[in-house]
Amino acid sequence: MNYRILLIITLLFFSCSEKKNTTSSLLDFVPKDASLVVRINNLSGLKSELKNNEYLSLLKSSTIYENVFQSIKNIQYLNTKSESLLVFTELGKENFEYLFIVPTSEELYKIDGVKNKSVETFTYENNSINKYSVEGSSFFSTTIDQTTIISSSQVLLENSIRKTNEPSKNSRLKQLYKVSNSKKSATLFLNTKNSN
C-alpha cells in the first residue's frame, strides 16, 4: 500500500514539472545591424493605409519610393492576422533588403491564383529554404521555431539562420517594442546608427 502511494506521489511530482518554453520571440530574429524595424500589428490595415496615404502618393515619382516599394512588393502575396516585423538591413552601399518575420501559419502565402510562379527548395545549415519566384521577382523563406522568416535576399536569410542560436542583444529595441502601441497598424523603429 505504501509503495502505491509513493508511486503516485512520484508520478505527480514528475508530471507537474515546469514546461520549458522553446518558442522564440519575433525580435530574436532581428539582425543587430537592422536600419529600420516596422512592428506590424495589422498587415491588411497597413497595406490599406500605405495605399491611401496622401504624403506617399506625392513621393511616387521619387527613386527612394520606387526602390523601397519595388523591394517589398512580394509582401502582397502574404496573408497574416498575426503580429509581424518588417526589417530593413543595408547589404552593400545603399542596398536595403528586407526580412519579414511572422509566426508560422498554414495560410501565410496567397500565391495559389498566381499563374507565373515557381518554388525551389534547398537546404542551408540543416534548414530548408524555399525560393519563390512570383511574377518576375523572387523571395526566400524558412521556418525556425514556429517562426517564418521571409527575405528579399538569400544572403540576409542565411545570415539570420546562422545567428539564430546567438542571444539577441537588441535590449533597447525590446524596451521600445514593449511600450509601443499595439492598437496601431504599425510602429516604426529607426536605428539612427545604421541608417543613412
Image: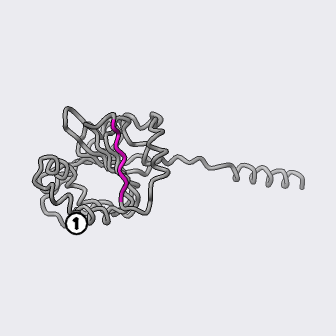
Q: Which residue is mark 1?
A: 52
On screen, residue 12 versus residue 50, left or right, reads right
Residue 161 horizontal/vertical position (percent): 36, 38
- Quadrant position of residue 103: bottom left
Q: As rendered, which of 123 and 43 lies closer to the eye? A: 43
Q: As rendered, which of 88 and 156 lies closer to the eye? A: 88
Q: Residue at x 26, y 63 (%)?
A: 110
Residue 2 horizontal/vertical position (percent): 89, 52
- Quadrant position of residue 90: top left
Q: Residue at x 59, y 47 (%)?
A: 20
On screen, residue 11 versus residue 158, left or right, reads right
Considering the numbered disc 1 on the image, is that residue within a helix, a strand or a loop?
loop
Q: Is residue 146 magenta?
A: no
Residue 191 horizontal/vertical position (percent): 35, 39
On screen, residue 21 versus residue 2, left or right, reads left
Q: Residue at x 44, y 47 (%)?
A: 145
Where the C terminus falls, by quadrant?
top left
Where the N terminus falls, by quadrant?
bottom right
Relative vertical location of residue 6 with respect to residue 112 in this rendering, above or below: above
Relative vertical location of residue 29 with respect to residue 45 in this rendering, above or below: above
Given the image, on which type of amino acid does mark 1 rest? Answer: Asn
Report the magenta residues as a range: 186-192
